[in-house]
Image (cartoon, rainbow, N blue to C red):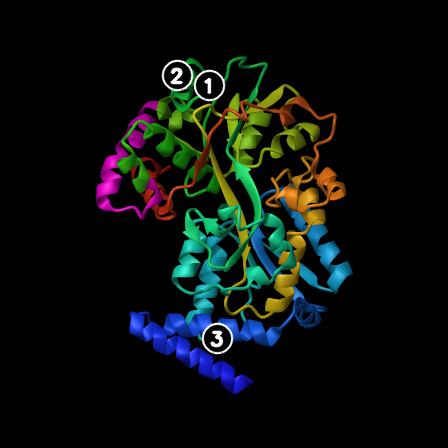
Amino acid sequence: MFSSKISNIMKHIVAALALGVSVYACLWTSVAYAQTNELGAWEEIEARGVNQDVYFHAWGGDPQINRYIQWVAEQVKQQYQITLHHVKLTDTGEAVSRVLAEKSASNHHNGKVDLVWINGENFAAMAKHQLLAPNWVAQLPHFALTDPDNNPAMSRDFGVPTQGMEAPWGKAALTFYYDSLLTQTPPQTLQQLSLWAKQHPGRFSYPKPPDFLAMSFLKYALIALNNSQPDAIKNRLYQPANAQSQALLLPPLWQYLDDLHPNLWRKGQHFMSSGLALRRLMGDGELALAFTFSAAEVPAAVARFDLPDSTRSYRMRDGSLSNIHFVAIPYNAAHTNSAKLVVNFLLSPKAQAKKQQANVWGDTSVIALSQLPAKQQKWFEPPALSHPSANIANQDSSPALSEPHPSWTKVIATQWLQRYGVMR
C-alpha cells in the first residue's frame, strides 16, 4: 500500500517535470497528500492531538480579544485536554521572523509557533518562504460551515489564494466613531474628512505606520482617492506594486495627507503608536473623531466608561476597507494535530457566535448561517437592546473595499515614514 503511494507520487513528479513545474513544488504537494491519507479520518487527528500544548501567537493589544482567547483556552482544555498558550504579539511579523529563523537553523519539526493569527502581507511573506503547513484546512469538519464553494473569500487573503494554508477566523471593516456632543455632523467621505479637520483643528488623527490601524486608514484613503481613475489603473492596486503603479496611484495619497496633516492632533507633528492610544485620546476628550477595525470595541469601551456615552459609530459613504483574518499553522509546528483541533473549535458555531457578541469581541462570523440549523442561527442574532454606539450608521450604504495586494502595505509604510516619520 505504501509503495503504491510512492509510485503515485513519482508519477505526479514525472508529470510535473513534463509541464515545467519544479520538483520541489510537486514533491511538497504530493507528500502533503500522502501524509493526509496516512492520518486518515478526523477521529485519528483527534486521537493524536489531545493532551498537548498549543502555542498560539496572536496580537495581544486588545483586552477584549485577549479575554476571548482565554475563553477558547478554557474550552479546548475541557474538550481535548489541550493547554492553549496565548503568546501575545505587538506585531505579527515577530512570529514570521521566528519561524523563518527556525527554518534557517534547520529546525523543521519542533518549532515554537504552533498557530498564528495572520493575514495580508504576513501571510504572503510566510507563503513565499514556504513557512506554512499546506493543504490542511479542508480536513476541518467545521470549515464546511463557511460554505467555501459559494464564498470564495474564505480561500483568498488580500486576493492571494490561501491554498489550504490558513483557515478563516473572522471578518472586519473600518468603522468610524465620534463624540456627538462635540460634532453633530461627522464627515461622510474622505474628502469631507479633510474639510471637517480644517473646521475642527486638532480633533482627529491616526496612528503611526506600520501600525495595523494606521495602515488600514491609509489603504482606505489610497483606494478612495483613486476611485475616479480608469479601471485599468485602479486594478493595479490588486496587483504587486511596481514603480509604474506607484507613480500612478500614490501621488493623490501624499497630496491629501500634505493637506490633512497640519489640521491633525498636534498639527500632525506627532502620531500615537496604536489604535488603543487613539481610543484613549477620544476618551480623554482630546479627539472628537476616530476609527477602529473592531466595531464592537466602541460599545464595549462605552460600557467600561473608557469612551463617553455620547459616542456614536458609522461607516463612510465612499467605502469601508474590509477583510477576512485567518489562522495558520507553521510548516514546522511541534503540535500540528493539536493546532488543527483548536482551529476547528474556533470555526465552531459556539465559538463563532460567542466571538460575534458585541460585549465579547464583536468580530463578524465567517460561518454562512444558511449552513446551520435554525436553533444555531439564533445564536448569532444581536440582542434586542444595545447602546446606540453599537448601531452602525450607513453600514448598508457603505461599499466594502477589498484590501489591496499585500505588497502595497510595505510600500505605503516605507514611503510614509520617509515623508512624515523622520525624527517624529
Count neighbours of disc 3 (C-alpha within 10 A) and say few if under 14, some if 14 to 19, many if 20 or more.
some
Q: Are marks 2 and 3 in contact (CB under 8 Å)?
A: no
Residue 140 place in picture, x, y as percent = 62, 60
Indicate which disc, 2 or 1, sits on the residue closer to the N terminus: 1
As measured in the structure, the alpha-carbon distance from the residue carrying label 2 to the one carrying label 1 is 8 Å
Element assignment for label 2: helix
Relative placement, left or right, of 304 versus 216 is right
Residue 5 shows in this picture: yes
Boundaries of the magenta span: 237-259
Indicate the quadrant containing the C terminus: top left, top right, bottom left or bottom right: top left
User: Which mark is drawn over residue 187?
Assistant: 1
Up/down of 372 relative to 327, above or below: above
Q: Amino acid at mark 3?
A: Val
According to the picture, the residue beneath numbered tag 2 turns out to be 195
Relative placement, left or right, of 369 versus 395 is right
User: Which mark is drawn over residue 342?
Assistant: none
Q: Are marks 2 and 1 in contact (CB under 8 Å)?
A: yes
According to the picture, the residue beneath numbered tag 3 turns out to be 31
Up/down of 172 relative to 10, above or below: above
